[in-house]
């Protein structure tokens, strides 16, 4: 019997998988809003937010009186630093707070990656919103302003010029940044030619699996439209380069065991390390990896967190697996395609639509917002384009604006590309 502490917010699959195991004595630290994921009788401590490490520490101390846990599972973006903190506090094996912070604090992440000699966009810490004009004068205009914590494209802003910076200092964005209770950083604006992701499984500091994929278009340019990617064949030269960068980033940040999700940007300056996380990817990527390689990254995350053996039998691949995230415009849904309609498209292996008529979205949009996921197999890159175009042709979502501010965004998804 393994004594396990789960610190979790938004990863339901991990919560279910751990509860289904008879060989685990499970305790959980979670937050309001996620409690219905846990069976009656689960040893559960509820905190206002797992971002507050002192609240997590106090909850962990209470749990240890009942369950002297030997392993910590921290599967979500916000639970990664909490998990590292608890491991370091109690002397438990696994990613320490120093490592977990480097995988979740984007400023520290870039410091360590740059110190290892890996290419990154020029960056700097932003200590106060009043510095936004000075930051632009230093980095150049435009530049990217973001919270040091958070996943995907959440709380990422492009600051266009000095006038825009001043409007941010006086407007709604300032209020959003002030509510984050997080450090900020700024990066030079990179004209991205291509964006990649690489997803891996690490055991004893070595990647035992790493898969490189190319996004259809840079993610920030795709918000409100189609976001997706396709895996690269094993012998693809760019794929090999991306996997090599992945291994070097893992070494630079010192991950002993875990799963990874890395973003790489290709620009006129070459390939730049974007951001990396030691958690499973979001959107359709986990399903993409499972269908293409037979690798369940949720299972791998649990195994590497609790000391289970990791035994992967990854097939060689020369084709492409596409994960296509169906766009979800702002407004109230009045009509939407069915999953069956999309499954009839050539090459489709999986389709799920999670949005239904009557659902309302007020915005703002980020990369975690989509109406469903389609997985498509393609033999060549030309076929990738053809099959994505066919899914786009078949998919339709209609929304009605319910406020003046939503009117510009309430359009059929097919019109958004």
Image: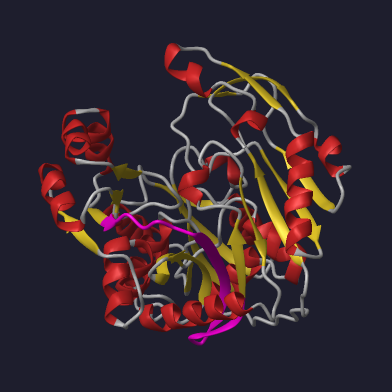
Residue beneath the point at 29% across and 55% down: 148
Judge whether 10 appears above or below 111 on screen.
Answer: above
Looking at the rendering, in which quadrant would you find the C terminus? top right
Seen at 69% across and 21% down, the residue is 357
Task: Say which of 26 and 401 sits in front.
Answer: 401
Q: How many badges with numbers are in the image?
A: 0
- Magenta residues? 187-210
Out of 300 and 376, give the one closest to the viewer.
Answer: 376
What x and y, as percent, mark residue 191?
40, 56
* Vertical comparison of 185 with 389: above or below: below
The secondary structure that most of the magenta stretch takes on is strand
Q: Residue at x 37, y 81 (%)?
A: 252
As drawn, the residue found furthest toward the front would be 268
Picture quadrant where residue 77 is located: bottom left
* Residue 4 relative to residue 24: left or right: left
Location of residue 232 in the rendering, given as x and y in whole percent from the top left corner? 67, 70
Q: Is residue 65 visible?
A: no
Position of residue 272 in the picture relative to residue 232 (left or right)? left
Residue 199 colored in magenta in the image: yes
The image quarter in which residue 371 lies = top right
Report x, y in % for residue 55: 30, 52
Quadrant of res 360: top right
Which residue is drawn at the image coordinates 74% and 44% (left, top)? 389
Q: Is residue 121 magenta?
A: no
Q: Is residue 58 above or below residue 170?
A: below
Above or below, comparing residue 120 to residue 9 in the picture: below
Taking depth in this image into account, of 154 and 86 the one nearest to the observer is: 154
For residue 170, say whether it is visible.
Answer: yes
* 234 to the left or right of 271: right
Q: Where is residue 228 shown, x and y percent of the image?
A: 62, 51
């Amino acid at each position: 019997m393994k004594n396990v502490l789960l610190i979790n917010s938004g990863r339901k699959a991990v919560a279910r998988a751990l509860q289904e195991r008879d060989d685990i004595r499970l305790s959980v630290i979670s937050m309001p809003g996620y409690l219905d994921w846990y069976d009656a009788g689960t040893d559960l401590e509820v905190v206002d937010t797992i971002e507050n490490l002192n609240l997590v520490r106090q909850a962990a101390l209470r749990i240890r009186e009942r369950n002297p846990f030997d392993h910590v599972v921290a599967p979500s973006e916000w639970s990664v630093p909490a998990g590292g903190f608890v491991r370091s506090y109690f002397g438990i094996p696994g990613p320490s707070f120093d490592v977990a912070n480097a995988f979740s604090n984007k400023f520290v992440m870039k410091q360590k990656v740059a110190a290892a000699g890996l290419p990154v966009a020029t960056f700097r810490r932003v200590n106060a919103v009043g510095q936004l004009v000075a930051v632009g004068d230093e980095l150049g205009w435009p530049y990217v302003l973001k919270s040091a914590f958070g996943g995907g494209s959440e709380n990422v802003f492009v600051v266009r010029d000095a006038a825009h910076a001043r409007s941010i200092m006086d407007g709604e964005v300032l209020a959003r940044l002030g509510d984050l209770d997080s450090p900020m950083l700024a990066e030079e604006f990179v004209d991205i030619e291509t964006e990649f992701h690489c997803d891996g499984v690490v055991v004893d500091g070595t990647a035992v699996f790493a898969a490189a994929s190319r996004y259809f278009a840079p993610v920030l340019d795709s918000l409100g439209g189609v976001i997706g990617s396709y895996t690269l064949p094993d012998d693809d030269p760019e794929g090999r380069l991306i996997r090599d960068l992945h291994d070097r980033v893992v070494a630079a940040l010192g991950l002993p065991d875990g799963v990874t999700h890395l973003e790489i940007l290709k620009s006129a300056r070459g390939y730049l390390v974007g951001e990396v996380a030691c958690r499973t990817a979001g959107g359709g990527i986990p399903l993409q990896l499972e269908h293409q390689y037979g690798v369940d990254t949720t299972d791998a995350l649990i195994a590497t967190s609790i000391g289970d053996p990791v035994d992967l039998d990854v097939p060689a691949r020369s084709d492409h697996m596409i994960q296509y995230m169906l766009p979800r415009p702002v407004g109230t849904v009045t009509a939407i395609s069915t999953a069956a309609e999309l499954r009839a498209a050539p090459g489709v292996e999986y389709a799920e639509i999670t949005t239904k008529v009557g659902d309302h979205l007020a915005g703002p949009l980020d990369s975690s917002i989509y109406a469903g996921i389609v997985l498509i197999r393609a033999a060549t890159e030309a076929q990738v384009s053809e099959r994505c175009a066919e899914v786009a042709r078949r998919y339709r979502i209609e929304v009605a604006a319910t406020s003046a501010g939503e009117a510009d965004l309430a359009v059929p998804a097919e019109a958004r590309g």
